Amino acid sequence: MDLFEHQARELFEEHGILVPQAEVADTAKEARAGAERLGGRVVVKAQVKTGGRGKAGGVKVAADPAAAEITARQILGMDIKGHTVRKVMVAQPVEIESEFYVSYVLDRAAGRFLAIASAEGGMDIEEVAASRPEAVARVEIDPAAGVSEAKAAEIAAAASLPGEAAGVLVKLWQVLIREDALLVEVNPLVRTDRGEILALDGKVT
């Protein structure tokens, strides 16, 4: 079972991973009200269980609550890869310094989990892996040992992530194990201009 982004971010919050403040809306008027509560300028994001939302026009910045209402009205009802948008999430915008990709996935053939990470987040990881495979680190994880602070530091170093991302890697592993997930993915994981590490998007299976 795939979770919606807003459900994945709730799990992240429960496990101590920082995410931008956000609200979920079923209607354009609810999106406007949410934007007002969040300070005005927001990112309006389609909530569908598929990737490619940004390229399809399902992720847009709204300058104020009125724009959030108009943008939500445009996005609600959209078809994105066969998925109809029935909810949007309005989230506080973040000043991004750099973007990364991190995920844990079950490697059924090997009977292990695999950490996949890259310092080039915010884009299709498949494209990065195909054009620049050296930019994507793949680190095997023994399920019995899990991801300790030392293992997280190893993954971060292999992918050229900042050292402070290691703490998030430990917490993402906890999400995977405690929630009995097969996949946990964050794209992008970002470092803000204040030096905070935040999950801007999330996918959990």
Image (cartoon, rainbow, N blue to C red):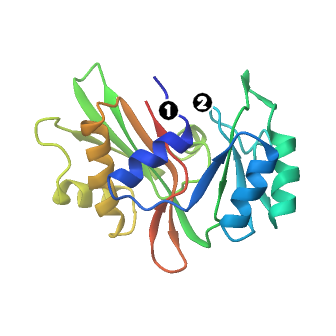
Residue farthest toward the left in the current orientation of the protein: 144
Task: Tell me where residue 71 appears, x and y as whole percent.
Answer: 84, 50
Task: Tell me where residue 13 appears, x and y as whole percent.
Answer: 40, 54
Q: Dividing the image into 4 quarters, which one contains the C terminus?
A: top left
Res 78 visible: yes
Q: Secondary structure at mark 1?
A: loop
Distance from Cα at disc 2 to Cα at disc 1: 7 Å
Q: Amino acid under label 2?
A: Lys
Dot label at residue 3: 1
Disc 2 residue crowd, few under 14, some 14–19, many 20+, Cα 10 Å = some
Disc 1 residue crowd, few under 14, some 14–19, many 20+, Cα 10 Å = some
- Vertical arrangement, residue 176 with respect to residue 17, above or below: above
Dot label at residue 49: 2
Q: Secondary structure at mark 2?
A: loop
Res 60 visible: no
Based on the displayed image, in which of its 4 quarters is residue 43 positioned? bottom right
Q: Residue at x 40, y 45 (%)?
A: 11
